[in-house]
Each structure stands twice: as C-alpha cells, then as structure tokens.
Image (tube, coloured by chain):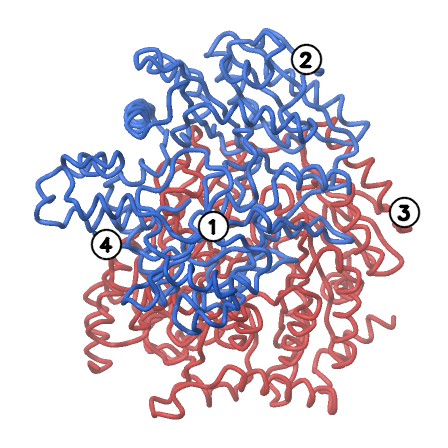
Chain colours: A red, B blue
Amino acid sequence: MASLDYAYRRLVNTLGPERVARSEFERMVYSHDFASLPKIALLQWRLYPDFVALPQTTEEVAALVKLSDESLLQITPRGGGTGWCGGSVPNRGGVLVDMRKMNNVLALDPDTRTVTVEAGATWKEVEDFVESKGFALPTIPLNAAGSTVGGSINSGSTGFGGLRGGSVRDAIASLEVILPNGSLLKTASQADAGGQLANLTPLFFGAEGTLGIVTKAILRVVPKPEISKPLTYAFPNLAAAARCLKGIVDAALTPYHAALMDRDHFVFDRALEADSPDPTDLALVAVQGSKDDVADQEKAMDGLAAKEQGTKLPPAVGDRLWRDRYNNYSARRLSRGLMVSYNLVPLRRLPEAVEKAMEIRDKLKLNGSVQAHIVDTTTAALDPYVLMDDTKPSGGTALGFVKRMGDAAFKMEGHPMGLGLFLVFNLRKMHGNATSAYSAVKGVFDPRKKINGGKTFEVWTKYPWPGLRSIPPPGMAIGLEVAAILRRVKPTRDRFVRAYEHTKEG
Amino acid sequence: MGLLRDWHYVEKAVQIPALAELIREALIHALFVRDDRVLPRDLIADLNRVPPVTVKVKEDAEVRKLVRVLNGQESTVSLGLSAEDYHYFRTQLGVGRTREFGVTMRPRTLLTYDWIVPEQRGVQLDFTGYAGIEFAVDGHRAIAQVGALWKRLYDEASERGHLVPFVPTVPLDFAVGDALYGDAPFASFRGGFASYVNALRTISAYGQRARIGFEEVANYGTAYDLLHAAIPLAGEFFIPLSAALRLEAKPAARKTLTYGFDDPAKLSAGLDRLCRFGPGVNWVHITDAVAAKILRPATPPEASTVQVSLGATTTGIAAKEKALDVAMVGFKAKSSETPNPYDVSADAYRKTADTVARSLFVGEVRVPAKSFGEFLGKVRAFGDQSAAKAGAYANLQETGSVSTYPFFSAPKDRTKVYDLSKGVRAIVTRTPGAAFTSRLAHLWDEEPNFLRRMSLVRSLKLEIDEAHVVQPLISP
C-alpha cells in the first residue's frame, strides 16, 4: 500500500486541494450517516475516512476509482448521508467520495419525458426543477430534501407516490455508473426498451454502492397534476388508521400518497414548535388529479375514514403536514440521536404491524414514533423511529430496537430494508438459499472488493489480521440482541426525556 | 426470453477461424436458417440436436431431484424410475459417457420463434400439469405455478374481487411461465409484467428451493434487485416454478371504451395525450384493421382501434370517460359495447387465440406514441412489398411508448421469419426513439454498451449457474 501522504498528493493532483479533505473535523463529519452510532463502534471499524474527495465530473470519479489501484485504499461512495445502516460509512478508512458536488440537473426532454441528473442532486432539487417545467416526479423518496438521487437509488428506497407511480426503480430509465475497474457503464439502452436489451439498472437499485459509483441518472417524469390536495383524518387509535390505509387499496383507490403517524410524533413536534397539530393518531392522504377526480377521491376517502371512526381534520393541518413532508425527523433536535427502522410488511397485516412496533418500542422503554405508508397494492413501509442519547455509553442500547423490528418484519412475512454495515446479518434471513446468487453479483462486478467492500453480505472490521478481519454476520445480530436486552433491563433515562414527558403529560 | 445461450453461441461462433470472415449478420442468418452451405457440419449438428427426454412436472420435488441427478450430486437410481423407464432415460441421455446435461423449460405458447440453439442433451421440462393458483385470503396477491394459464388466473382473480393488471398484448393462450422462459407479452398501462412480480419460487442449479424476492412484499433495500434484473432471462439463471404476483382490487366500476381512428396522425396524437391521462386506466389495447378483423370478425374494423379499460368509483367513472373523450379527440367512432379480447369466456378466448396464433410474429417494437401511426403505415407497406399482409397488436404504456407486435400473414418458415424481422428492423432504425427488442434484434445489436451489459449478464449466469445445469451455455 502506498503511503497516505503519497495517496493524498495523487488525490490533490487529480481534484485540486480544495476538493480533497483530510482534517480531523471533516473526516469526523463523514464517520456516520443518519443513524447515531455509539463510540464503542470505533473499536470495531475505522469509521473515519483517510480522505474525503469531492469530484465534480464523471471523469474525476473514474480517476478516483483508478487511483485506488495504486493506493489500495478502499472507496466509499456517499450521497446525502441519509442512510440508516452504515452503507455510506467507511469501515476501513480509505477514500470517501462525496458526490454532492455533482448536483446538476442536466436536461429535461419533454418528448421522452425524462430528466437527466447528476447523482449528487437531491430529489427536492430535481423535483423543483421538473415542476418549474410543468412536470412531476412519479415517485420521490421520504427524505427528499437531503437524499441524493444516487444515494436513494443505492439504498433502494421507497417514498411518496409509490401506489400511483410505481417504485423508484421503475422511475429510472437508465444510469451511468463508474465500475470498479474505472470504466463507464450505461445500465440500459437509450430507447425505452421496457426492461429488454440487457437492462442492468435493477442490479444497482439497493446495491448500497457496492457495485460501482452512480454518477448520472435518467429519470422518468410525468405531467404535473392539475390539483394536489392533502387530506388528514384523526383516528381513535393507530390500528384504525392502518385499517383505513388498507381500505384504500381494497377500494381500488390510487391516491398519490397515504401514510399514518402516531400521536407521539406530534408530541415531539409540539415540544419543538408550539403551533404544530394537536397530538393524535392520524392518516395523511394526498390526492391528485383533475378537479372532478380530486373531489371524487376525497369523497371516497371520507367514506373510508368514517368506517374506522376517523374524523376529518381542518385543511390547515393537511397543508402543514404536506409542506413539511420531507422533514419528518425533526424530533432529532430533542435528543442527541435518532434511529429509524425501515421495514416492509404486507399491507394486509399493517394493523398488526403498527401494534407490534408500538409494543416493541414500549417494551424497550424507548421514546419514539410509529409511522407507515403504502408502497404498492401488497406492501406497506413501516418506518418507526426512536430517540437515543448516544453521548452516554448506554445510549447505544437503543440500536436493539432496529434488530427487534427487523425480526418482527420477518415474522410478518416482510423484511427490514437495508444491510449496509450494521444489518448484514439479515441477508441470509432475507434470501435463504438464494443468498449465494446475491453474493455472486458482487463477485462479477467487483472481484477485488474495491468499492464499499466488507458490507452488504459480509462485515469487515478495521483489523487486517486473519481471524479478526471480518465478523460472522450472526455475531452482529447477537450484539444487537444483547443491546435490546440491556435496554429492557436497565433503561436509560435519556436527556431529552424530561422535557418530552412534561409535554406528553401536559 | 431464452437469449443468453443463442447470444453466447453467436459470440463464440464469430471467433471460429473458418467463420471469422463472415460478417456477423450473415453468420446469424446462417445459424438462424441452419444453412448447411455456409456452416460446418458440427454446427449444423448442434442446431438440429433436441433434448431427448421430456419430463412432465407435477411437483417441485421431481425437479429438485432431477437437477441433482443432472449436475451429478445424485445418481439416476434416486429418480425411482421403473426398470424400463430407467433404461430409456439413461440410454437417451447417454448417461455413463463424459457429457454435461442441462435442463430447459418448454414454453407452453411461443409468440415468435424457437431458440437458435436448442438444448443439447439433457432434459426438457413440461409444466403444463403444474398449474395451481393460490390467492391470498386477505390481500391482492396470487401465487401462480408456471404452468397456470393467464386466462384462468384472470378469471379466477376476478371472481375473488381482484384485478390482474397485466394482459397479453397479443391475446394468445399463454401460461404465466411463458413470461419467464418464453416471450409472452404481458403488460399493463402502468408497466410491464416484471412490475407485478413480487417473487419467484425457483430451483437453483444445485437442486435447492430458492426464493428470489419476497412473496408478500416488494423487493426494495435487500441488496441487488436480482429478481427484476433476471426476470427477462429468469429461465437461464434458475428454474422458475411459481411467481408471486401483485394484483389489484377490482374497481367498483369498470368500462371498456373503444375508439376508432381512420387518420394515423390523429391516432398518434390521441395516444400521446392518453399516455398523460393518469390513474384509472388499466390497459390500452391497439389493433389495426387486420388484427381487429381477427379479434372481432363480426364487427367491421376501423383503420385503427383503441380499446381503453377504465376503472373508477361508481360516481367517478362518468367524469373519467368524459376526460378520456377529450384526450382521444379526433376519433371517428366510439363505442362502449364492443367486447374486449380478455373479458370473454375461456372457450371463446382460446378459439380467438388459435386464430391469432396462425400469424407470423417477429417480436416487440417499442415506438414513441407520437410516431405510432406512421410506424404502423410503414409496417403495412413493408408487408405489401413482401407479399405478406401485415398487421399489429399493441399496447400503450404510461411512459409514452407503444409496445407493438407486428405480424404477417405468411408461412412460419425460418427464412421468412428472418427476412421479415430484418425488414422490421430497417423500419425501426428509421424511426427515432424506437427499439426492436426481439431475440434476433439482440443478436444483431453491436452497440458497445449493449455488448458490455450482455457480457456482464453472461458472467453473472456463469457464477450463479456454476453447475452448468440451467440452460447451460454452449460453444460451437
């Protein structure tokens, strides 16, 4: 391996000094993603990258990848860092490639109804651009304000518009990817060939940056709807809201978005902003279309909600929630950290799933909120979050929540989302006998494991010595299970709790 | 669509010194029509070899055992055959000689043409008897075994309050598996068949049950989306046995509206507006006069007919129909009584399918909606020039593409198929934004990015099917 100083000089020669960082502070910023990690994790992984590189062109990304053949440093691609399982965090230092400087919207083609964007652009930026031209994105990830196009493609995310517009995967016409050998691959044909002509795009959807670095995406756009109207309904409990969401699909309605949030989310919100909606278990449904169509959908929704004793809330509530829809984790400001557990569960079992999530949260004596949204006619995303104080050694025990939620999702014939660095133990549970076929994909694209190695289907540690080089994935599961047990036995009284409980009781 | 074996064979054949001087297309032509004046005797023998044994599958355990025998993990004794069958099986396969055996799946109905390179040696699986369908009790999901007929799935789902969103653009009597290892053109307005597949139950090359995807939920955030990358070639990676399909709820009100057009420009403009229509449209089926005559012999056909299946609430359907009329402005005639090809009895469907199947199909052409009318005119003119009356079945997709299946009234001999395919390709190359996605078009394509992708897919196949059992690749 070349010395770090030599590697630094080569990086600076490629990108210039202003786009290569190696200071302690800058490296620290990139040592975690949206999930909070206890300090103890540093014993296991070298989470601080050696360098942070900020390329601006596809050619520069290719040069960085080729440079790693000389320096033998691992490459970790990263978008907005809104992931939750360590997919964009280094495990052995190396070069972290922050794609956010490649954030241009390059072209909108009204004829083919596609928009070409660089991978570092956030979804919100792309949405604003296409809306200014009279179009809309068919689907958009939950964290659109911070999530980059490349980042969410790599995490295989779900979000707004799935029931009507299909998945984010279906919204991608083609990708440009720098492969681990430094070459450029276009993942699909130029023409709309409907998945034929060897379309490799799906392989990169959810790949967590392990197959290459996505530099550009051609996304499909749809005509901007005439009217968009958010509707909100308060329910006596969360299970009733879940039944209402299921009822939407059973009634063959196709709103743009349908989600539920529990009252705790609004309790947190109120602790931060006095004018937030009154805490209640509610469903948020956004309907779009022509004036007649929206009126018809609204009427049908009112009927469905009434069946579950739902009360329609004033339009101002819906408008506010819709305006803030990309900023769903403001509760993080109350604590030092926040953990999100993303899971997909069968829509038909959503009422049971939300109750299970509340049960796990309460058993582990955690403060958090249960949320869910419809993904498609069979699937709902259950994405509860819990608050944690990662400044205390015991704060990390909240990570046990993610493990327990994932196990519950499997039991309900669903699965947790994301593998990254922390949840690799779920891979075999997800794919069973097909796991080896998934590992084969990495072997074909990156046999030397240069890009984001030691993740997704194996867990590397920072130690290069035989026997300690990697951890058996079940070991991680045991660790998180122990965290859950500790959490249950000796709950941490998190710093923010007093303020929160005061609000809740008040 | 079984493609990798043909593509690999062609790639290897161009490297044979004796054939290296042939241009690629001439070689593909020679291989396709099995031209013994051009090809060496060994290659002709490869092309004429057929799998000697066909096994009618009744349960997945049989397939598992068979695969384990074929890849050498178990002996033929474990097949439990009678003495006579045992002898026959071993003799036909040539067991005992140094040979590799593969297993291939036989499509029930093939829209276009057979593979260039048949399965060499080995066993062909016939899934016609493996046709169970299981519906979720409280959700919109079905698990259909690969031999289950699409029409049966459609009818039984409808009885249970579900809607099967995808329909065959060319109304043939396809089985569900034909979309996995054949070329069944299932699609809806909102997407292709793959969009509606949650998971596949398969048997791996090692004889293990392997589920690709998740039966009850979508497949996001679980590492590579191998399921959707593999679906067009599923039968070359695994042996698919069942597909978990995502259905929809049957809307409270449904209507099929039929619009007749006599002007291609108006048709194209109407389709272009229609693809921006939004929710409520289940499928849009387009036929020219020749196809319409086959589907509805009793009705005088328009030059082009567009059938739109609408679904909505009982109160909303009228407004949707009104909006649709506005989108389709320029039509010559409109009817809400004309039957669609799918909502008919199973017998009537099969009868029509038999008639449809007499035509010669060359594969799918994707055309931008704006150019569809013009494309159709060119195909018709080409058919007239080739003394093979041309027609087309098509469906419109939300993306603005029309997935078109041109057909010709011509005998289905391989030379004719090749020549007509070549003619269609010539039209496609002159149509901006169009793509020809037939198997021959894949073999003709020499675009560097496409070749790289195919090469990666081949590497992936060789890694996943390390035992060389599932439609193994063959070199000349």
- Name which residue lies at 44% across and 66% down: A438
The residue identified by callout 4 is B475
Q: CA distance from mark 1 to mark 2?
A: 37 Å
Q: Which mark is residue B370?
A: none
Which image quadrant for residue B277?
Answer: top right
Q: SS at mark 4?
A: loop
Dots 4 and 1 on the same chain:
yes
Dots 1 and 3 on the same chain:
no
The residue identified by callout 3 is A307
Dots 1 and 2 on the same chain:
yes
* Residue B137 % position (x, y): 77, 53
Which image quadrant for residue A331?
Answer: bottom right
Name the amino acid type tagged 4. Ser
The subunit letter for the residue under badge 3 reads A
Q: CA distance from mark 3 to mark 2?
A: 37 Å
**How many residues crowd mark 3 within 10 Å: few (<14), some (14–19), many (20+)?**
few
The residue identified by callout 1 is B231
Marks 1 and 4: in contact by CB < 8 Å? no
